[in-house]
Amino acid sequence: MPELPEVETIRTALERAICNTNIIRTIINNNNLREKIPEDFANIISGTKIISCGRRAKYLLLGLDSGYSIIWHLGMSGKVIISSERPNPQKHDHVLIETDKVWLAYNDPRRFGLITYCKTDEIGQHRFFKNMGPEPFSDGFNAAYLLNKFKNKSIPVKTAILDQGIVTGVGNIYASESLFFAGISPLRPANSLSREECSRLIAKIREVLKNAIAAGGSTLKDYQKPDGSLGYFQNLHCVYNKTGQKCPGCTCDISQTGGIAKIVQSGRSSFYCPVKQK
């Protein structure tokens, strides 16, 4: 599933391509996604102007001059394709949006994504967003906040930072990477972290996400940028999907330590260095 860096990369591409363009028409080829596309979706968005391209957690938000916003989630395998002319039909092209500058195609083989709309001034109260925690780059995501959120949680810290009610957009890849740089084991109970460790973890989450955005995200399976190119942050992963390998700066005898370890937590794979992460 695209995580925050991948969605932010797509948001930036959309902002360059379609901000301040007019939607000429909308073609729905298949409305049977994770949630059905509303019957009036095409009528609501066609004829409007796109005035902003935002993001909340892993959702894209396209603000329209009509007072509505498009809410777009790519699910597990969805992608947005930007084309200067109407794209050749592809299997799993569920939605086509023609603007006065480019075409957008929403392709999603597994159909776990969604596209809908909401009044812009009601987004904060929408069921998708009303229980979300702060964005990782926001001022509200600070050591005092995280320490308070963790104080009654005995679940592993890795599981806790995947909780979108605590912090939004930090997915599985970047949780493993952030904990590695913070020197914190994913096995630690969340309520065992000190204020200093919470502060360090926040700094590393921001650093990892910032570097991943700069690299265009991580391409592991389905993800690609709207121009068809791939992200390359996967080439910079330190622990994620590197079971048995040395971690950066390793001085261990991995025949003794086993190198980077893989465990499963709440159904998700976690990767960490048992020597450096305590």
Image (cartoon, helix red, strand yellow):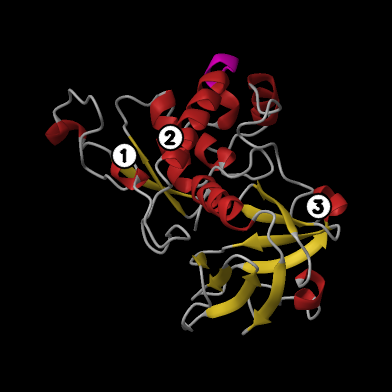
Residue type marked 2: Asn
Residue 215 x, y percent position in the rendering: 39, 42
Q: Residue at x 81, y 52 (%)?
A: 123
In the rendered structure, are the residues bearing label 3 and label 1 in contact, judged by CB atoms less than 8 Å apart?
no
Residue 115 x, y percent position in the rendering: 68, 68
Between residue 100 and residue 87, name the one nearer to us: 100
Q: Residue at x 60, y 65 (%)?
A: 101
Q: Is residue 46 above or below residue 256?
A: below
Q: Is residue 15 left or right of residue 48?
A: left
Residue 25 x, y percent position in the rendering: 70, 77
Q: Is residue 219 above or below residue 200?
A: below
Please give the residue where the numbered disc 1 appears in the rendered image.
236
Please give the residue where the numbered disc 2 appears in the rendered image.
211
Snapshot quadrant of residue 187: top left
Answer yes or no: is residue 59 visible: yes
Residue 48 x, y percent position in the rendering: 78, 65
Please give the residue where the numbered disc 3 appears in the rendered image.
123
Q: Is residue 164 left or right of residue 254?
A: right
**Does residue 26 show up magenta in the picture?**
no
- Label 3 or label 2, whichever comes before in sequence order: 3
Q: Residue at x 37, y 46 (%)?
A: 263
Snapshot quadrant of residue 24: bottom right
* SS at badge 3: helix
Mark 3: few, some, or many residues within 10 Å (few <14, many ≥20)?
A: some
Highlighted range, magenta: 193-197
Give the spatial CA distance, label 3 vs label 2. Answer: 29 Å
